[in-house]
Amino acid sequence: MNDTLSQQLTPSQKKAVFHLEGPLLVIAGPGSGKTRVITYRIAALIDTGIRPFNICAITFTNKAADEMRQRTITLETPAGAHISTFHSLCVTILRQFAAKAGIHPNFTIYNESDQTRCIKQAIKDCGLDTTNFPPARCLDAISNRLKNNLIDVDSFKSQADDFFSETLARIYARYQQILSQANTLDFDDLLMKTAFLLRDHPDVCSELGNRFRFLLIDEYQDTNYAQYKIAKALASAHNNICVTGDPDQSIYRWRGADIRNILAFEDDWPDATVVKLEENFRSTANILETADRLISCNLNRKQKRLVPTKPPGQDVIVNAFADELEEAQALANQVKQLTDNGASLNDIAVFYRVNAQSRAIEEALIQNQIPYQIVRGVEFYNRKEIRDMLAYLKILVNPDDEIALLRVINTPARGIGKTTVDRLRTYASHKNITLYEALKKVGSIDSLSKAPKAKIAAFVNMLEQFKTDLTGQVAPLAERLFIESGLQQYLKAAGEDGKNALENVNELINAAAQYDHQAEKPTLLDYLQQISLVSDVDAYDTSIDRVALMTLHTAKGLEFENVFIVGVEEGLLPHERTNTDDADDLEEERRLFFVGITRAKSGLYISYARYRTIRGQLLRTIPSQFLFELGINFAELTQEDDGFSVITQYDFNPGQMVQHGSFGLGTVTEFIDMGENSIVVVKFNTGQTKSLMLKYANLSKIDNI
DNA sequence: GCCCAGCCGCTTTTT
DNA sequence: GCGGCTGGGC
């Protein structure tokens, strides 16, 4: 790397970049130039003569991987390093060593809705009821408690010692059996099977260890046990493992991520070098101080500084609104004001805790003719018509995929009804063959009469003619299949709904054409794999100027000039499903807020609504406890011209702590509930006692609803 | 075998 | 408020 480049680095960044051999932990606060460090480090490694082929960088999303690849190209670094997500890396490894991993190399990948179908089937097959064994709960247990912790069916069976565990073990066993018969892996299998492959086959482990002589892992705070074991196995031969992350940005505990992986890195690798990047090049000092006050409320945390390099900038705004409609409208107004002052829409983002919150924002933006995008890549692939198309394509590469087959065997309706399918399945299980094989042998199934036999034969023939060449381009294949399966005709006949669906499938075919264009060697299997592993943020597209709407989780890793965080209320942030008695759960919600705040470069607008419609019901809300931890004055929308003070909360109990804009912290001594004109008496820490009248903006208007 | 109505259950975040 | 599933009618 030339000197000009390395001059762009701070001393601690340099230390991380030029630490070449041996374990390295980079604790990188938000906006501290972490991506720069990783890409420069790759360049520095290659500079010393290490072949790109021997470098493996693992990111959290495909988008991050693409970006990193792009940035190494900008640095004129020779290409060839493996840069991908954990899951993509695992797919590559598993296809290469399929036999040793005990799977077929042409496996396909099940997403969450496929998983749900399978688990329901498994529960049913075990003779159990989904009311007693809710699919979502079972899946969560199998995924996060078992698979992500590398507990396979046999070991769980041997340790199950109560009724629930024993039953769960049966469901787990059946679930895995369904998947393996369909020649499919779910997300967790990708990690688990890879971890087992490396554990049980030292030859594979050392081959891969020698190939990937330098391992870099980003967002290490959000790795789970399986990922941790994979990383450890790959690096065990050479100890050249560099991990980067920020414990304060760990937000995936619910998905099995274990923050201890990063906290205990130095125990795992005793000779590890630790570099802390604390300077923040992104946000104004005001934003950083707000973020710092908030995150300091997490007690289970290593102290870390956020050092601003920018001036204070404008104040962080906290707004209270009557309801989510007013909140959305005010947001739209503020967006207009920002663009009037020269901001572009791509500089503006809106974050929320749950996807359902996007709706009110969307409506306000539409009303005000403000272009926007909802950053939610996976949603597209969950549409019915898209899933139908993908099911057809999946069958071509993996005819064993029974879920895909059952999905389209009668879609569009072609006279192969439930009874016929049941008979086919019975036949298949008697003969111990797959459903697709049964379809091929339809002539010899006695339980079927002539008409269904002919329909099945026609269906199989239609599919078989596509299977001759699957190594070419995907888009032409998809288009032909769309037509010949009858799906296009079906959608064309379906009126207004079908029109939309038709557009979506065309978009899918366009995307496939783009894939064909970009891929070195396009294949259907590879295409399907890419689609299976998309994340929400992968769909984030800045080519058109528009406001970005996304969840706080999706926002991780991004940055915007202006950020709106809406719905900062108890029940949403922290979310109602967080166990507030569990400090770790609550602290993760706080970190999520922290992640959102630290995305903002200069403008930060935090808001909550006093009333919110949730699942069709208008509910009074309570401002989030986190708001009181920001240490900033609340901007109420009520006029304060009558001399009374305002506190942003509704109901008080004696002894409760409050934060007041002018008087600071205090303790409630009395609460006089008089509806709209309630009074709270507070003894402030300054020593003075005040009677404060509570004012609720537009309360009468709302109560009339 | 197909279609539709109505009911039920769920409803946080996502690779 | 929504979408998936079931059961009944054609």
Image (spheres, coloured by chain):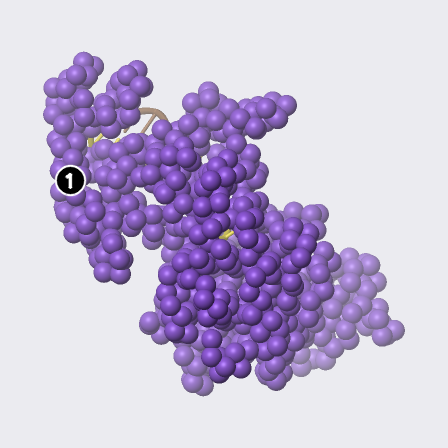
Chain colours: A purple, B yellow, C brown
Q: Residue at x 33, y 71 (%)?
A: A543
Question: Going by the image, does A438 lie left or right of A536?
Answer: left
Q: Residue at x 78, y 63 (%)?
A: A657
Q: Is residue A34 above or below residue A384?
A: below
Amino acid residing under circle 1: Thr
Name the residue beneath numbered marker 1. A468
- Crowd rating for badge 1 (residues with CA inside 10 Å; few <14, some 14–19, many 20+): few
Q: Residue at x 73, y 71 (%)?
A: A660
Q: Nearer the viewer, residue A548 or A444?
A: A444
Q: Position of residue A471 (x, y in %)?
A: 21, 47
Extreme residue toward the top, this view: A446
Q: Is residue A167 above or below residue A243?
A: above
Q: Residue at x 48, y 83 (%)?
A: A4
Question: Going by the image, does A100 lie left or right of A142?
Answer: left
Q: Position of residue A150 (x, y in %)?
A: 54, 37
Q: Position of residue A169 (x, y in %)?
A: 53, 26
Question: Going by the image, does A64 lie left or right of A677?
Answer: left
Q: Nearer the viewer, residue A412 or A702?
A: A412
Q: Is residue A587 visible?
A: no
